[in-house]
Image (cartoon, grey):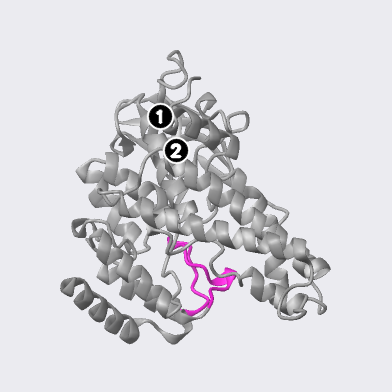
Amino acid sequence: MSDLNAFRTETRSWLEENCPASMRTPMPEDETIGGGSRQKYKNPEAKVWLDRMAEKGWTAPTWPAEYGGGGLPKDEFLVLQDELARIGARSPIQGMGFSMIGPTLLDYGTEEQKKEHLPRIVSGEIRWCQGYSEPGAGSDLASLQTRAEDQGDHYIVNGQKVWTTGANFADWMFTLVRTEPQAPKHEGISFVLIDMDQPGVTVKPILLISGSSPFCETFLDDAIAKKENLVGKPNHGWTVGKRLLQHERSSISGLNTGGRSARLDKIRSLPEVAVEYIGLQDGKLADAALRDEIIKNRMNSAAYNLTQRRGMAENESGGTVTFVTSVFKYYGGELGKDRLEIQLKIMGTQSLGWEGDMFTEEEKIATRTWLRSKASSIAGGTSEVQLNIISKRVLGLPD
């Protein structure tokens, strides 16, 4: 424990000295850092903060030091998370390189793949996107039809991917392709990495009701995937792809940080919102039904957070757990949507502000967050898919 206390003291001191003042403020959406060759830094201090954290390996604190990571054991990693939260520090960088493909390469990548890609993720040099879903192959992902023809030292890839988040900013894409069309659909799939900077790759953004365009369509026309960028064995990509989804669900639910961070943590609590928009009567909300909804959501959120921490504490490996990630992804998504629906009831029409002087910037963000939350039961695998996984793989129920 004394060693952990010493680490906390050293970490606190380093953060106080190296985290710029503007990086201790809430992150505006247009200042989010994803890295890569197309990244523009609206706030110059964001680049300073990224470089300092990357040099420590703390953009990927638990990854092995030989690949640029921080090499922190689980207990020190959680201390770092606590200390970052204590000063309200922004995440220096985020994205699929850290939450998805990086951990998957640590699981299945060759030594050469790890050395080539992981340090560049840590430094923010490259940005990744995911090529999974296709028109007609969403929840039934194994029905994908994008084909990769073996050309000896490379594959020629043809097909279309959809909902490829951030593809218009990405340098690389990790994707599932069909390499054996005659095999059963789960057995003829391979997992490959594709350089986005080539003539055979075309990206078109998709506009969402929230007003932003994080999703894209990606067209692959004789695109090249080198054999050295095949992850795992040929025709065994389904196993790799499923593991990557577990990493994604762990990140979405906040499980990989032991409940230290989640998507809605920066939003004001429901009681704070209620006091501002409704006010109190005799020290409490007059609407008993609404009061009960808020209390129930708060209690469920607290129980969920404690379960996250217990899940990480019981995970001896310190990495991503397996099928139980579906439990956290499903419940966390539904809990977040419920919270935002209650917020809408509290704020009334002020929670539906899109533009204009009659709405504050915070109210406009609340509107977009509420709209974006509708995707929580779809992204990373639909709620229905998660319930199937839970019933079969966690509870052991029969098909």
Compared to residue 132, the image places residue 213 above or below, namely below
Seen at 27% across and 71% down, the residue is 55
Q: CA–CA distance between discs 2 and 1?
A: 11 Å
Q: Which residues are magenta?
A: 26-44
Residue at the disc numbered 1 = 238
Left or right: residue 116 versus residue 355 is: left
Residue 218 x, y percent position in the rendering: 56, 42
Examine the image and state in which quarter residue 385 appears. top right
In this orientation, which residue lies closer to the viewer: 92 or 41? 92
Seen at 56% across and 56% down, the residue is 300
Residue 343 x, y percent position in the rendering: 71, 64
Q: Which of marks 1 and 2 precedes in the sequence?
A: 2
How many neighbours does mark 1 have within 10 angstroms: few (below 14), some (14-19), or many (20 or more)? many
At numbered mark 1, what does the secondary structure look like: helix, strand or loop?
A: helix
Q: Tell me, yes or no, whether the highlighted magenta stretch contains residue 386.
A: no
Q: Which mark is residue 175?
A: 2
Compared to residue 350, the image places residue 155 above or below, namely above
Compared to residue 184, the image places residue 86 above or below, namely below
Q: Which amino acid type is marked by label 2?
A: Thr
Seen at 32% across and 70% down, the residue is 80
Residue closest to the far top: 182
Q: Which mark is residue 344?
A: none
At numbered mark 2, what does the secondary structure look like: helix, strand or loop?
A: strand
Residues under numbered marks 2 and 1 in contact, where contact means CB atoms less than 8 Å apart? no
In this orientation, which residue lies closer to the viewer: 85 or 117? 85
Residue 233 x, y percent position in the rendering: 29, 28
Q: Tell me, yes or no, whether the highlighted magenta stretch contains residue 31.
A: yes
Secondary structure character of the magenta stretch overall: loop
In this orientation, which residue lies closer to the viewer: 262 or 292? 292
Q: Which amino acid type is marked by label 1?
A: Trp
Left or right: residue 135 versus residue 104 is: right
